[in-house]
Amino acid sequence: MKNPHFGRIASVVLGSALVACASGTANTPAAALQPAAPAASAPAANPTPTAPTATVPPADTKAAQSPPSPAPSKSEVDQTNSTTAKSDSEAKPSTAEPGCTKLAGRTGEAPEWGSGWIDLAALASFDARTKLKINVGGSATKILVRLLKDGQLPDQPVGVLGKYAVPSGRLLEVPITGKKANITQISVHGSPKAWTYHLGADNGPATIEEVEYCK
């Protein structure tokens, strides 16, 4: 049998449900009912700024260079040369006695022959009544002295002035008795025998240290 109140009860229940639904909707915040806003994308990070490269202008090389030193004047050069010559003269004082001149040249020796010589730097002439002062090296006590003229052969017994005893101080004075011209070499000869000249069985070799010409 159908309940006469069923329709009424159903209407009441349905109405209550509608009221509850409407009430839940009313209590929900408006923000919850709105669609979610799209998430804002994070701004891209700015790259680190790079400092601009400074452009350096090329250096002025002309301004940086020192000006060239001026060339010395002729008077300065002459003064320098004069000072140098003076220094050389003071460093090597002449040992020649007054009236004597040291002869320039290149000395040499031949130990196998017991002889020594000086090749003169220039041809020399020696006047009569002058003398040569020869500083004799070696151990010879007797020597021959020879003046070799330009063009003569040194292996020949030409130009021999004579046989001389060597002083203990080894400084031999040789008198020039007649004029001698165009002399290119002065030599001394020791050993027991020089050419055909016998100087003693125990005689030693001779060399030349230096020669002076005295007027």
Image: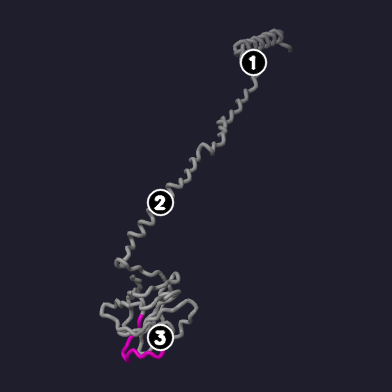
Q: Residues within 10 Å of mark 1 (few under 14, many from 20)?
A: few
* Residue type, numbered disc 1: Leu
- Numbered disc 1: secondary structure: helix
Q: Dots 1 and 3: beta carbons under 8 Å?
A: no
Give x and y (percent) for residue 24: 62, 13
Q: Splitting the image into 4 quarters, where does residue 103 fall?
A: bottom left
Start-end of magenta stretch: 195-206
Circle 3 sits in a helix, a strand or a loop, which is it?
loop
Q: Amino acid at mark 2?
A: Thr
Judged left or right of residue 15, residue 198 is left
Instruction: Name which residue lies at 26% across and 77% down.
Output: 169
Label 2 sits on residue: 80
Q: Where does label 3 land, which residue?
A: 113
Tell me if residue 198 is in the magenta stretch.
yes
Disc on the earlier residue, 1 or 3: 1
Q: Nearer the viewer, mark 1 or mark 3?
A: 3
In the picture, the disc for residue 33 is: 1
Q: Does residue 56 lie above or below 80 as drawn? A: above
Give the residue at the far left of this rendering: 168
